[in-house]
Amino acid sequence: MRKNGAGLRRARGRFFFSLALLCCGLIYTVSPIDLIPDVLGPIGWVDDLGALALSCVYAGYSYFSLRRARRAAR
């Protein structure tokens, strides 16, 4: 029982971290400061879309991990 509670806490912390990371990814996408300038056209948009895509994938993974931990804790 104790192990499931610890797993749920870890999954919940990972989920909230991923939400913060998702917010950072959104801010990076709309901010004018980039690793590759947007003046270069599509090449400059790749880093924006990559940061957004990675943060979305991690948020989705952590959400389903949290759901799995909640089911195991029941």
Image: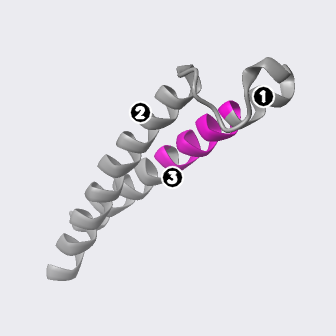
On the question of residue 1 being in view, the answer is no
Judging by the rendered image, the residue that carries numbered circle 2 is: 23
Mark 1 burial class by Cα count in 10 Å: few <14, some 14-19, many 20+: some
Residue 5: x %, y % from top left:
17, 71
Residue range corresponding to the magenta coloring:
48-59
Please, is residue 6 above or below residue 65 in the view? below
Amino acid type for the residue under numbered disc 1: Gly
Q: Residue 9 in the image: x percent, y percent?
A: 21, 64
Q: Specify the principal SS of the magenta part.
A: helix
Q: Name the quadrant of the N terminus.
A: bottom left
Which residue in the protein does label 3 denote?
A: 61
Q: Residue 2 placed where, x, y %?
A: 14, 80
Q: Give the side of residue 7 with respect to residue 18, left or right.
A: left
**In percent of the image, x 27 and y 71: which residue is there?**
7
Left or right side of 57 for 63:
left
Tell me which label, 1 or 2, sits earlier in the chain. Answer: 2
Looking at numbered disc 2 in the image, what kind of residue is underneath it? Cys
- Give the residue number, with chain letter if any, for mark 1: 44
Please report whichever mark, 3 or 1, sits nearer to the chain's N-terminal start: 1
On the question of residue 72 being in view, the answer is yes
Horizontal side of residue 55 vs 48, given as left or right: left
What residue type is disc 3 on? Tyr
What is the CA distance from the residue labelled 3 to the residue labelled 1?
27 Å
Mark 2 burial class by Cα count in 10 Å: few <14, some 14-19, many 20+: some
Q: Position of residue 26 (x, y in %)?
A: 50, 28
Instruction: Determine whether 34 is above or below 69 in the image.
Output: above
Q: Is residue 8 covered in magenta?
A: no
Q: Nearer the viewer, mark 2 or mark 3?
A: 2
**Which residue sits at x=61%, y=45%?**
54
Of residues 35 and 17, the one nearer the viewer is 35
Q: Is residue 56 above or below residue 33?
A: below
Quarter residue 19 falls in: top left
